[in-house]
Image: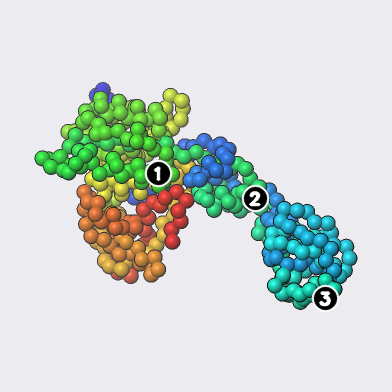
Amino acid sequence: MSTETAAAAARTAASAPADWAQARSDAYAAGLAAALPVAGRPLVETDGLTLAEPLTTRTDLPAFPTSSVDGWAVRGSGPWRVVGRVLAGGTPPPLTEDGTTVEIATGAMVPDGATVVLRIEESDRTPDGLVSGTPRSTPEWRRPGEEAYAGEELLPAGTPVDPAVIGLAASCGHDTLRVRRAPRAALLVFGDELLTAGPPGAGRVRDALGPALPSWLRRYGCEITPADVVGPVADTLPAHVSALRTALARADLVCTTGGTMHGPVDHLHPALAELGAEYVVNTVAVRPGFPMLLARLTGPDGRVRFVAGLPGNPQSAIVALVSLVAPLLAGLQGRPMPALPHATLAEPVAGRGDYTHLALVRLDRAAGSAHPVRHVGSAMLRGLAGADGFAVIAPGTTGEPGARVPVVPLPLLPGERAS
């Protein structure tokens, strides 16, 4: 690395940590500015992707009047003479005479001229074969446009596609949807001290992030395969540069674990400098996890890629994931900035001075309360395994019992909705 490049890296490293909320906003804006391409995809291929344009109806919903019960579509007052039968999928002739009726099935098209539908269980037959009964005062059919009118916007662009959205699109008459493709992700694990199998010992620790982070990334909508996970990468600058260059050739986002500080074997910052990366965020005033970073690079094809540097301590890495990677991926997918729900603290949570504190909590959704969990050190994962998210304790404050605070939720499976 040249003297000039090293000096630039040192200047960047000396910058003050970014405010947590601002860092989150900056990550989202960077992703939105580089939003992924749009393509039309068949409905069956859209689950987990994102609407790139509003979902509108191609016809009224329903498109024609349909019976909501099995019964009789009648005209005029009874008793009624039976003149036909209507099943779902057919187009009936109109009823043109008072005192006539057609038998009708649930979901069948109501004939023109019908004035009311009489339920089958509330009807009788006279000795001469006529239908009698007293129709209910409330309509027993669905009128055109009752659910939506033709051209009405049902869902905005940026809506995640799940099975319910797919079903709605099909009912509207769509065969394809315009969606943004899923972000492609890769993971580089740094650290010669890491073991990839068996129990820790003899000064070496088990890598917990390499197996876990791909699943977190999939929950944020990424595509990542076992071949996209590389490591441990040797603790040398050439190895870091080579691994990053290879991963960036195929991924929109490369996450790295470890090496975000400036120790003797922390090569991420010099590697980013050598690759010509620009920092979006470089360290965040949040505990745990402050030595996180987000950088962007423009590839030979002119497309922007991102590198998210996650700390090596496991819980700190997840703090970086929810703080920078989640909003970045929302932007890349054209989704809204993730809104933070609020909960009431059931117990006190310490502040972290001038830093935002992200404190692991378990949520009681029925009561709307957040309960701090134990075993929450930066290197620990036991607390995370029993938590639903992180309570946000603002700088210069403490979390008092009864206080309403934002909560950063841990990601759900694609298409899954929080209760």
Q: Secondary structure at mark 3?
A: loop
| Residue in front for this viewpoint, 419 or 252 | 419
Of circles 2 and 3, the one toward us is: 3
Residue 18 visible to the viewer: no
**What distance separates the C-alpha of mark 1 from that of mark 2?**
29 Å
For residue 127, the mark is 3
Mark 2 closeness class: few <14, some 14–19, many ≥20 residues within 10 Å: many
Front-most of residues 144 and 113: 113
**On residue 172, which mark appears?**
2
At 40% from the left edge and 68% from the top edge, which residue is drawn?
366
* Distance (Cα) linking label 1 and label 3: 67 Å
Residue 180: x and y in percent read: 52, 40
Within 10 angstroms of label 3, few (less than 14), some, or many (20 or more) residues? few
* Residue that mark 1 sits on: 218
Mark 1 or mark 3: whose residue is earlier in sequence: 3
Q: Quadrant of the C terminus?
A: bottom left
CB within 8 Å, label 1 to label 3: no
Verify CB contact (< 8 Å) between mark 1 and mark 2.
no
Mark number, residue 409: none
Q: Amino acid at mark 2?
A: Cys
* Nearest the eye: 311 or 103: 103
The answer to whether residue 238 is seen in the rendering is yes
Residue type indicated by callout 3: Pro
In the rendering, at what x and y percent does residue 367 appear? 38, 70
Q: Residue at 40% of width from left, 30% of height from top?
A: 250
